[in-house]
Image: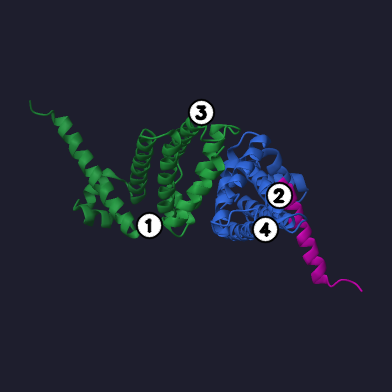
Chain colours: A green, B blue
Amino acid sequence: MPKLWNETIEEHRRAVRDAVLDATAALAERHGPRAVTMSRIAAETGIGRATLYKYFPDVEAVLRAWHERQVSTHLARLGGLRDGPGSAAERLEAVLESYAAIQRRRGGHGDVGALLHRGEHVDRAHRHLADLVGGLLAEAAAEGDVRSDVPAAELAAYCLHALEAAGGLPSGAAVRRLVAVVLDGVRP
Amino acid sequence: MPKLWNETIEEHRRAVRDAVLDATAALAERHGPRAVTMSRIAAETGIGRATLYKYFPDVEAVLRAWHERQVSTHLARLGGLRDGPGSAAERLEAVLESYAAIQRRRGGHGDVGALLHRGEHVDRAHRHLADLVGGLLAEAAAEGDVRSDVPAAELAAYCLHALEAAGGLPSGAAVRRLVAVVLDGVRP
């Protein structure tokens, strides 16, 4: 059965949108989010500028959409690690390491990173993340691998704030040391 | 010997400025920084609105000046604790407790707090604070009370980021628990 016309249109729109966000990701990766412009996206995707402006009113809207997709991808990855194999303590360590690496990359984005890192979708993601980490901490506490004298929600806030320090660290080794220090804080 | 005219003028200006900032502090304390307006400052100080506008172009300038004074006061207090009696570990604990209490009050300021908390004077204060805490950590490490497997500067970044979690905590008891967890992370 042939697809409905509306479905084809919808698929095409999604493909254009994805191509724009992929190009934005590539440009941001290479030159930082500040260097992303509508002209560069047009050149990178081969989509005409006029078409591009039909999808996004300005480069800020593109960056916002790109950032929302980034945040969702990160949350999905962290969710995958939480649901992976191993004890709660092992999965907690994997989640915190991955989050620290995300924070470190974000630190390099400077002002634009800080600018994007506001707004409703980020608040929602933070709450989701706090629940995810808090859940693992409670599980690990029940298994005796995490201190039980401090509520899991408070320990989660501690972990997530402390790991933001990764944004200013000079090396991957320093990030691993930071994760070790943070984990020492939650041990029984 | 009578004071020079210029000195008298200068003293008067400083007194007006201080009165404006004291009123701002009182209003911000009572109702939050968002509720501070030029009219309210005028009413609180008894200074005419016309005079007020000669000192500060708008309420944002007043809030900025008030915030700069707040930050200086906090740094002076933390510096006093660093230079106080006791071992480096004890003085470190006093500094971190005081900083956590400052963060907790700041958390209540919401958007305006976040807005004020940008700018050159805050960056300078952060560097100053990182040096202050890093110095204490290095001293405490030399005395065997703090781990020496992680550079003091990295531990300082960890402490200061982790304590920002105090901004969202519901009670003084929770803040004390947070400080205890952070300190457990830096122990040998």
Mark 4 belongs to chain: B
Q: Quick one: SS at disc 3?
A: helix
Mark 3 belongs to chain: A
Q: Amino acid at mark 1?
A: Arg
Q: Residues within 10 Å of mark 1 (few under 14, many from 20)?
A: some
Q: Amino acid at mark 3?
A: Ala
Q: How far is mark 4 from mark 1, CA to CA?
A: 46 Å
Give the percent coordinates (x, y) of residue A65. Answer: 34, 43
Q: Residues within 10 Å of mark 2 (few under 14, many from 20)?
A: some
Specify start and end residues of the magenta stretch as a single range.
B1-25
Res. B94 mark: 2
Please state which of residues B188 and B2 is positioned toward the viewer in this rendering.
B188
Dot 3 corresponds to which residue?
Answer: A142
Q: How far is mark 1 from mark 3, CA to CA?
A: 45 Å
Q: How far is mark 2 from mark 1, CA to CA?
A: 41 Å
The nearer-to-camera label among 2 and 3 is 3
Tell me which residue sits at (55%, 59%) in the image: B151
Please state which of residues A58 and B146 is positioned toward the viewer in this rendering.
B146
Give the percent coordinates (x, y) of residue B87. Answer: 73, 55
Task: Work out which residue is located at the far left of the displayed protein and give it.
Answer: A1
Q: Amino acid at mark 4?
A: Glu
Mark 1 belongs to chain: A
Give the percent coordinates (x, y) of residue A12. Answer: 18, 39
Dot 1 corresponds to which residue?
Answer: A34
Q: Amino acid at mark 2?
A: Ala
Task: Work out which residue is located at the far right of the displayed protein and give it.
Answer: B1
Mark 2 belongs to chain: B
Q: How far is mark 4 from mark 2, CA to CA?
A: 17 Å
Q: How far is mark 2 from mark 3, CA to CA?
A: 32 Å
Please state which of residues B171 and B123 is positioned toward the viewer in this rendering.
B171
Do residues under tags 2 and 3 come within 8 Å of each other at their CB atoms? no
